[in-house]
Image (tube, rainbow, N blue to C red):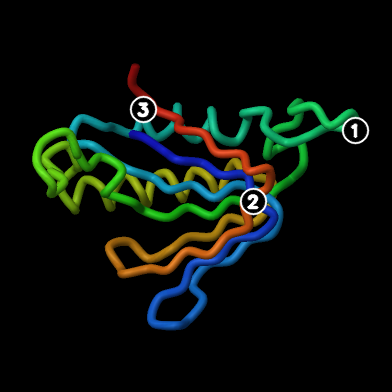
Amino acid sequence: MKAIIQRVSYAKVTVDDKIVGQIGRGILVLLGVTHEDTVTDADYLLDKIVNLRIFPDENDKMNLSLQDIRGDLLVVSQFTIYGDTRKGRRPSFTESANPQLAEDLYNYFVSQAENKVFGNVQTGIFAAMMKVELLNDGPVTFIVESKK
């Protein structure tokens, strides 16, 4: 699994001009699943994301985690994270998981987040055409992977 995470002041996701998920201060997760991923990958990634110290403390140092600030989490499925652009002009998505596996692991990740995150947990809609709006705080953006 791979996630692009962004520290945000706010973020929201809309489908057909309707807000389906919205958070305040916290982390926006764009979550990608590859065909080799399991619940172990999801557990590792979630633990890493919610405990990663990317929020400023009173001295403006990145010393606080999402859990420390009781921040919100917005999780959006993003199969294009595994798009391979090395050859030609059109990305290849052979590394992206099949839709059923991806949806199962996405739902598992979200359900575990709901049990673990102190703040509000929101989502997009799996496989929908979504629009994501955010105010990146910093900007602070990281790529977190379960394999490496």
Q: Image check: 125 left or right of 60?
A: left
Identity, as a three-letter code, of the amino acid under mark 3: Thr
Name the residue beneath numbered marker 3: 40
Q: Position of residue 89 (x, y in %)?
A: 13, 47
Name the residue beneath numbered marker 1: 58
Which of 70 and 139 lies nearest the eye of the viewer? Answer: 139
Q: CA distance from mark 3 to mark 2?
A: 27 Å
Q: Where 2 falls versus 146 (above or below)?
A: below
Residue drawn where x is 31% and y is 43% of the image: 81
Which of 3 and 126 lies nearest the eye of the viewer? Answer: 3
Q: Where 134 falls versus 131 (above or below)?
A: above
Name the residue beneath numbered marker 2: 8
Residue drawn where x is 55% and y is 38% of the image: 141
Identity, as a three-letter code, of the amino acid under mark 1: Glu
Kindly report which numbered mark, 1 or 3, lies closer to the viewer in this rendering.
1
Q: Image check: 55 left or right of 31?
A: right
Q: Where 43 falls versus 106 (above or below)?
A: above
